[in-house]
Image (cartoon, rainbow, N blue to C red):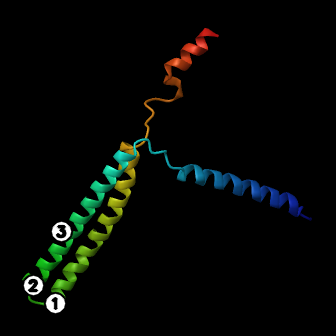
Amino acid sequence: MTVNSSAASDDLEKGAGVAVKEVTKELEEVAIVDPWKAMLVNRFMDAFNVVSALVYIGMSAHIGKITNSLRRAGLTFLCLLPVMIVTTFVLHDMRKRSVRLYATKKSVGGSDSDLSAKLLASEK
């Protein structure tokens, strides 16, 4: 039983093309309509990121100041470290979602809710 290698490679290329189209469709960003709002959201999120970093630095310094042993301070910092890392990643995702929410064009309904398209179709 022989397999036609060109047919198999064509099927593979078609499958890869479909997969690439799906990935690019998912990664496609919505066009930013209002760059001023996008800049404002980015500045606010930068400020929030700096404040959260200062809070964690302050907590770590306070823990180091009030504890008597270095081991206890290290364990407390290791317990605090995952919270700091997760907060950083959540802030990055929240920045993307905020820009997408506030600075992009939103469609209220689908294409079916366009009144002018319905009126033009009814005139024909």
**Residue that label 3 marks:** 55
| Residue beneath the point at 29% across and 64% down | 87
Type of residue at label 1? Answer: Leu
Q: Is there CB contact under 8 Å for labels 2 and 3? A: no
| Residue beneath the point at 45% across and 45% down | 32
For residue 56, side relative to residue 65 (left or right): right
Q: Residues within 10 Å of mark 3 (few under 14, many from 20)?
A: few
Mark in the foreground, 1 or 3: 3
Type of residue at label 2? Answer: Thr
For residue 18, side relative to residue 11 (left or right): left
Q: Mark 2 to mark 1: distance in Å?
A: 7 Å
Q: Mark 2 to mark 3: distance in Å?
A: 18 Å
| Residue beneath the point at 70% across and 54% down | 17
Which sits in the foreground, 18 or 88?
A: 88
**Residue that label 1 marks:** 70
Residue 69: x and y in percent read: 12, 90
**Residue that label 2 marks:** 67
Outermost residue toward the right in this view = 1
Q: Is there CB contact under 8 Å for labels 2 and 1? A: yes
The local secondary structure at tag 1 comes to helix
Type of residue at label 3? Answer: Val
Q: Quadrant of residue 2?
A: bottom right
| Residue beneath the point at 22% across and 65% down | 52
For residue 99, side relative to residue 71 (left or right): right
In this rendering, the answer to whether 52 lies above or below 15 is below
Q: Quadrant of the C terminus?
A: top right
Of callouts 1 and 3, the N-terminal one: 3
Mark in the foreground, 2 or 3: 3
